[in-house]
Image (spheres, rainbow, N blue to C red):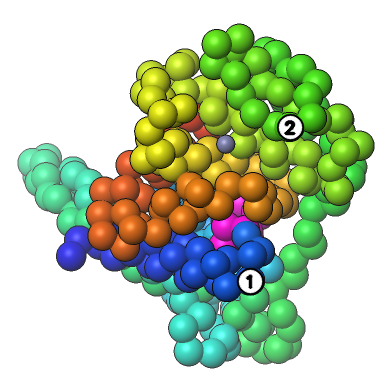
Amino acid sequence: MSAYDKVLEMIADKIITEIEAYEATGEWHLPFQSALPVNVVSGRPYGGVNVFALLASNKTSPVWGTFVQWQSLGYKVTGGKGCGRAVYSPSFTKKDEQEDGTVIEWQRPAKAYYVFNGDDVTHAETGEAYPYESANVDGRLSEIDAFFESINVTITKSHKASYSPSRDVINMPAFDAFTSAEAYYSTLAHEVIHWTAPRVNRDCADYGTNLQVRAQEELVAELGAVLLCTHLQIPVQNSRNDHYEYIAGWLKPLKEDKTYLRTAIKSATEAVAYVKSLAS
Ligand SMILES: [Zn+2]
């Protein structure tokens, strides 16, 4: 199994566990947190499949680093067994120039390696935890409204959230109809991902008639909403219990088809990149 597939399988297992719990309890949410995972040394966010790998870890800190990176900052990993998370690093070609001017090209293979979360480290000398303050959601609402306005999506009031491809509009209940600002924006983010389908040539022509097409598109919308909410730094609240038919529809392909989650993550990432390009 490739390094990439190993990371995918870990994410799939997490979602499968959540679906099985949902069948028992009737409570549904994707097993992802929403603070964008960043590297402790570079400050850069993790990308691609690694966003989901790290969000699925049930940690409160968004900061991650390798064992050596934490050590270089004076911290030691003190979390229990299994506190590390495998992330994927693709293969790349590197050129090294020698002293005599010749250039040697070498290929570094794709691999999975372990990173550790800020929750699981303490300072080697003081014993203090790594500091982290969570974002204040309420203070950011006008910026988030401005973001959605800047992408020029048409939103009309409705009793139910949905995207209408024929009219190319997003139907949304009133803001006050939601239990929280996060619930409103998470729902809007989900519908915005549907709205990208015709714009990035994601084929959803059979959405209304083919349950498999529908299940795949809904998985893309849920994963895309997670990515978009992490970008906007708002907690995801994807607790839409009206979607049982497609949540159950994910179980079999997630267990049996390696390409299913890979395709959904790729499509979700593309959709979010498109939305971000409109907003910038
Ligand atoms: Zn949907």
Mark 2–mark 1 distance (CA, rounded to whole Å): 24 Å
Front residue of 150/113: it is 150
Q: Residue 265: percent from the left, percent from the top?
A: 41, 44
Main SS, magenta residues: loop
- Quarter location, residue 100: top left
Q: Which residues are magenta?
A: 29-37
Q: Residue 7: percent from the left, percent from the top?
A: 34, 62
Residue designated by label 2: 160
Residue at 73% x, 32% y is 160
Viewport quadrant of the C terminus: top right
In the image, taking residue 191 as reference, residue 92 lies left or right, namely left
Look at the picture and state if 232 lies above or below 157.
below
Question: Tag 2: residue type?
Answer: Lys
Front residue of 238/160: it is 160
Q: Is residue 276 visible?
A: no
Considering every residue shown, the one lying at the far front of the view is: 209
In the image, taking residue 175 as reference, residue 15 lies left or right, namely left
- Quarter location, residue 133: bottom right
Secondary structure state at the residue bearing disc 2: loop
Q: Is residue 163 visible?
A: yes
Pointers 2 and 1 in contact (C-beta within 8 Å): no
Ligand 1: which quarter?
Answer: top right
Q: Residue 46: percent from the left, percent from the top?
A: 49, 51
Viewport quadrant of the N terminus: bottom left
> Quick one: label 2, few (<14), some, or many (20+) residues within 10 Å?
few
> Between disc 2 and disc 1, whose residue precedes?
1
Secondary structure state at the residue bearing disc 1: helix
Residue designated by label 1: 25
Question: Tag 1: residue type?
Answer: Thr
- Quarter location, residue 111: bottom left
Front residue of 244/132: it is 244
